[in-house]
Amino acid sequence: MKVLGIETSCDETSAGIVEEKDGKLRLLSNIVSSSISLHAKTGGIIPETAAREQIKYIIPVIEESLVSDFDAIAVTVGPGLLGSLLVGVETARTLSYVFKKPIIPVNHLIGHIYANWIESSEIKFPAIGLVVSGGHTNLVLIKNHKYLTWLGGTRDDAAGEAFDKIGRLLGLPYPGGPSIEKRSLDGDGKKFNFPRPMIDSDDFDFSFSGLKTAVLREVKNNNLNTEFVNNISASVQKAVVDVLVNKTLKAAKQYDVESIILGGGVAANQKLRNELKEKSAVELFIPSKSLCTDNGAMIAAAAFFNYKAASWQNLSANPQLHFA
Ligand code: KG4
Ligand code: ZN
């Protein structure tokens, strides 16, 4: 069976085809068009601009992804920006009506987790899932494909959002995450001892907005020269990675899991990948970097394990969709 996955929840327009054979997934195509360069000019996403771009690109992107036929259409229905989600959802409804194919609505956050199944079929349960993106920081316990429990999440900014906002304070190109990672390579992460909010709290919640305030204080008292920006970048990256690694390992231990599964744009961060690899006592799964950031293939992958077809008449976008 082959599924066409469509993803338009934020600033990417993406479509991909994934095939399932004997329980294993195979990636046939994954086309991503990003409006990042437009948002770089404004230092962040303007929802109206994102949606207008997505309307322009959705058909060419789907056309390019159609390297084979498909049996069903999976589409992100939430969470995300309403205008952006509607582009994908309305396109999927139209394709479903015209080609008489079922639609499988997919939660974007679940999609990030299932990006892992495109490259690994042997992921053992129970597992701890960490979804870290521009809009979300969530820890979940996955007992099996049908049973997922939310353990905690951010109380304010998501990890990626913190990187993006701090990147802007430092005058770095949008998105902040990759820019901060790049500048960290030449910086000293011990120069600034930034707060590690909630690192020892009794729950699985996160808070990253205090980090932004701490950086703002330093920025006000210093010149934004190369050495300063590199050191702040390395210190911020270290603080965020410390908190994410600490909480994820704590959850893995407490629930005595067999694996840790990462997903979301921040999972592309090499320091986060390295530290978890080094410290995890259980098997660790992280998608290739191109499958960490938003893409259509992960939405198709999630559909195989959450196959609940909806009719095009009943499908609608839900910007506030939660994890479970
Ligand atoms: O999953 P994603 O593409 O979109 C959302 O669902 O939000 O994640 C985008 C986020 C942005 O905040 C971006 O700064 C961050 O992921 N990001 C990174 C890296 N690559 C992307 N953060 C840290 N290091 C990276 N290499
Ligand atoms: Zn995402």
Image (spheres, helix red, strand yellow):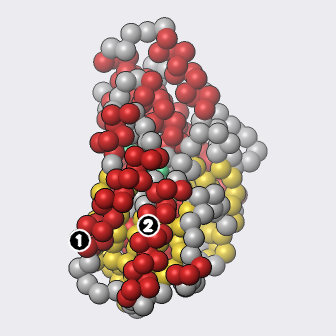
Relative to 132, residue 217 above or below: above
Q: Earlier in the sequence, mark 2 or mark 1?
A: 1
Q: Which mark is residue 88?
A: 2
Residue 170 place in picture, x, y as percent? 41, 23
Which element type, helix, strand or loop, lies under badge 1? Answer: helix
Cβ of mark 2 under 8 Å from ligand 2: the answer is no
Left or right of 58 in this view: 102: right
Q: Is the residue at mark 1 in contact range of ligand 1, meaning its CB lies under 8 Å from it? A: no
Task: Tell me what residue is drawn at x 29 percent, y 42 percent.
Answer: 37
Secondary element type, mark 2 = helix
Q: Identify the residue at the far right of this view.
A: 202
Numbered mark located on residue 208 in the image: none
Q: Residue 90: x and y, percent?
A: 46, 70
- 252 up-or-down from 142: above or below: above
Mark 2 neighbour density, 10 Å: few (under 14) some (14–19) many (20 or more): many
Please state which of the two labelled residues, at mark 2 or mark 1, is closer to the viewer: 2
Query: Is any atom of residue 46 visible in this view?
Result: yes
Seen at 42% across and 78% down, the residue is: 94
Which residue is at the front of the view, 235 or 98? 98
Q: Position of residue 203 (x, y in %)?
A: 74, 48
| 3D distance between C-alphas at marks 2 and 1 | 16 Å
Question: Label 1 belongs to which residue?
Answer: 64
**Point 39% across, 80% down: residue:** 95
Residue 317 in the image: state x and y as whole percent. Answer: 56, 66
Residue 264 appears in view: no
